[in-house]
Amino acid sequence: MSPTSCQTAPPRARRVKDYIDCGKIVSTKLDAENATRSGWNDVASGSSRQRRYTRPVSGFGQSLRREFRLEPGVDFINHGSFGAAPVAVLAEAERWRSRMEANPDDFLRDVLPAALRAAAAELARFVRAEPTDVAFVENATAAISAVLRSLEFRPGDEILLSSQSYGAVRQAVRFVCDRTGAKPVEARVRVPVSDRAELIDALVQALGPRTRLVIVDHVSSPSGVIWPVAEIIALARSQGARVLVDGAHAPGQLELDLPALGADWYAGNCHKWLFAARGCGFLWSRREAQRELHPLAISHAYGSGFTAEFDWTGTRDFSAWLACGPGIRFLQALGTEAARAYCHSLVVAAGDQIARAWGEPLGGPPHLHGFMMAVRLPPRWQRAATRENAAQLQSLLMREHRVAVAVMPIGGALWTRISAQVYNSAQDYERLLEVGLRGPD
C-alpha cells in the first residue's frame, strides 16, 4: 500500500495495514526517520515488506558496543543475568509504544490481538514450533510458575529439580508444595561437572514412582552448563513423569526445535540471548497439555484457550513482546551461527585463562557450555557460600572495579560466572582476572 492509498483507505483497513504481520507496515514520516537512525528499513519480502536491520556491522567485539547503550568504562561480562537489548530493538519497542499512546483504545482493542499473534508466530518459527503453541510471558520464571500453579498435586507427589535449579524456580516449587502437600526432591549435581552422563545419572537416581513433574534446566543458571534435556525428557516420560524445561538461557544461545525435545512445557526468555527488550519471555506447551494451563492472572479470556488466556491478562505495556521479532532479526543480521561460534570461543578462552591464572577449576568442560562459564573464586575471595555474601561481592566488583559479573554460591563455595556476548572482546575479562589475583581491597 502506498502512502497515498493509505491516506484514502478506510480507518479499519488503515489500522490493520499499519500494525500487523511484523513488517507489513506503512511507515509514517516519523517512522521513516527513526528507521534511518536505528538501522531498520522496510525491505521487500515476497509480496510484502518486512522491517530488517540493514546497517552494516563490522565484526564482533568492541566495534559492536555502539549498537548497545552500555555504560563506558564498565566491563559487561554478565549478559546472562539481565541481557542488553540493542539500540535498534529498543527503537522498535518505542515505535510500538508510541503507536499505543497515540490511540490506546484503538490499539489495545483492535490492533494488539493480531499484532501479538504475528509476533508470536515469528518467535515460533525461530524455535520450530507452531504459533498456537507459543504464548508470551514476562520471563521464564513467570512461565514456570504458571505451569506449577495450574497443575494439581496431591500429598506425597514429588516434584524433581536439581541442586543447579534456578533459585526462583526452587522457591516456586516450595510455594506449591507448602500448599498441596507435595514434596520437592533435589537431585544433587557435583560441580565441576565431568560429562553429560553425570547429569543424566543425577536426575535418574532421584526419579521415583511418585515423581509427577520433572523440572530440568536446558542451560544451568549458576554454572552455564548445558543439560542433555532430550535424553532426560525421554527417561522421565518413560517413568510416567511430566517434564517442564527451564530454558531461560537457551533461546539464541542454542539451536532449538521445541516439539522435537519431547517435553510437556518449555519456558524461555527472549531478553537474555535473543536481544529482546526486558520483560519478554514465552511459554511453549505440547498441544494436549494446554487445556489445564492458565496464566498467573486470570482475566476475561478464562476458558477460551491457551493463547487467548495468556495474550491478555490485563492492561500492560506489550512493546517488548511486539518487538521480539526485531531481536531475532538483529541476531540473524549478525549471522546466527557466526555469533554463536564467536561467543562460545570467547567465553571458553576467557574462562580457561582466568582459571589457569587463579589456579581454580571451571564448572565443566568447554563442550558442555555455550556462552557462560563458571570459575571458582580464589581463596582470598572465599567466605560462607550464601546468596547474601555472593551479592555483596558482586556489588563490590561493580562499585570498586567497574566489573559487571555474576557471583554464585555453588556446592559450598563462591564462583564467578562470566558471559560472552557479541559486544564483548578478550580485554573485557582482563580486569576480573587481575582483581581476582589481588583479592578484595
Image (spheres, rainbow, N blue to C red):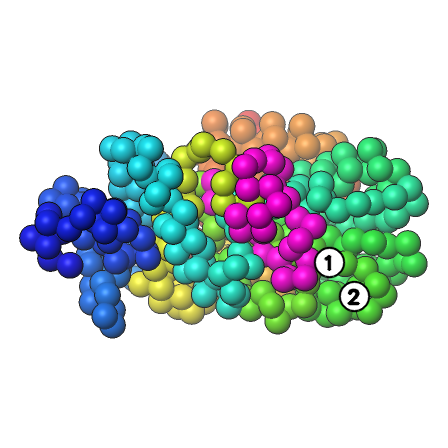
Residue 246, above or below 43: above
Residues at circles 2 and 1 in contact by the CB criterion of under 8 Å = yes
Residue 43 on image: x %, y %? 20, 63
Residue 208 found in image quarter: bottom right
Please tell me whether residue 246 is drawn above or below residue 344 in the rendered image. Answer: above
Please name whichever residue, 337 or 9, is drawn nearer the observer in this view of the structure. Answer: 9
Where is residue 47? Give x, y as percent: 23, 70
- Residue 301 forms part of the magenta stretch: yes
**Real-space CA distance between mark 2 and mark 1, rounded to the nearest whole angstrom:** 7 Å
Kind of residue at disc 1:
Val
Residue at the (32%, 32%) spot, across then down: 104
Left or right: 214 as drawn, with respect to 260: right
Residue beneath the point at 81% across and 60% down: 241
Residue at mark 2? 237
Write the start and end of the magenta stretch as one range: 279-308
Q: Mark 1 highlights which residue?
A: 243
